[in-house]
Image (cartoon, rainbow, N blue to C red):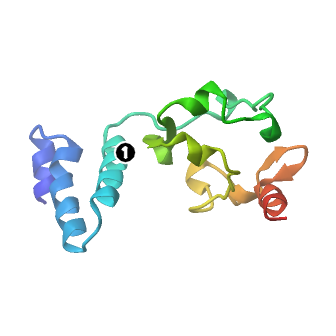
Amino acid sequence: MGAVYSYLFGESPFDASWPAYEEKMRAEGLSNAAIAAFKYNFKMLTSGANLMIPGESIQPVESLPDYASLTTEDPALLKSTVMVKLNGGLVFDFPPYWLVDPVHLRTTGGLGTGMGLEKAKSLLDLKEGRNFLDFIALQAA
């Protein structure tokens, strides 16, 4: 009732609700990183912003450099850190040498029904009739 009352009288949904969520997570012993990630996502959710990405705005990548052609002399890899955007907007700095080794791509989470999907994300067609599961199998081989 307190959060609803606060919201009705001028406090944002985030400000009205966040203290209770934070208290519960700290009581459960969650890490600061986990709390910060949840806080960011909860703030985005309660902001009222449109968080949907229209399907027609998503375009396939036309070309990527072949892995074998990449070298440690690549200017992008010579930076002290490389910014990588993950997990709904969280940005991480990685040392460039972390990005020299191959990456294994895996889908995690739910079925994607919240994104309007009718099947598991891992079954989405990606390229040349292959889905995520096909690419994972090729990586593991």
Query: Where residue 56 sits: x, y (%)?
Result: 69, 29
Left/right of residue 97 with respect to residue 128 in the rendered view: left
Q: Quadrant of residue 8?
A: top left
User: In front: 47, or 60?
Assistant: 60
SS type, badge 1: helix
Q: Nearer the viewer, residue 104 or 124?
A: 104
From this viewpoint, which residue is outermost toward the right? 128
Question: Considering the image in quadrants, where does the N terminus appear?
Answer: bottom left
- Residue at the location (19% across, 72% down)? 27
Name the quarter where the C terminus is drawn: bottom right
Q: Is residue 13 left or right of residue 82?
A: left
Looking at the image, the residue that sits furthest to the top is 75
Q: Which residue is drawn at 37% across and 45% down?
A: 45
Query: At which x and y percent is residue 26?
Result: 20, 67
Q: Mark 1 points at which residue?
A: 45
- Residue 38 point in image, percent of width and height: 34, 54
User: In the visual, does 80 lie left or right of 17?
Assistant: right
Tag 1: amino acid: Leu
Q: Residues within 10 Å of mark 1 (few under 14, many from 20)?
A: some
Residue that appears at 79% across and 64% down: 140
- Say whether residue 107 is left or right of residue 70: left
- Of the pair 109 and 78, the residue shown nearer to us: 78
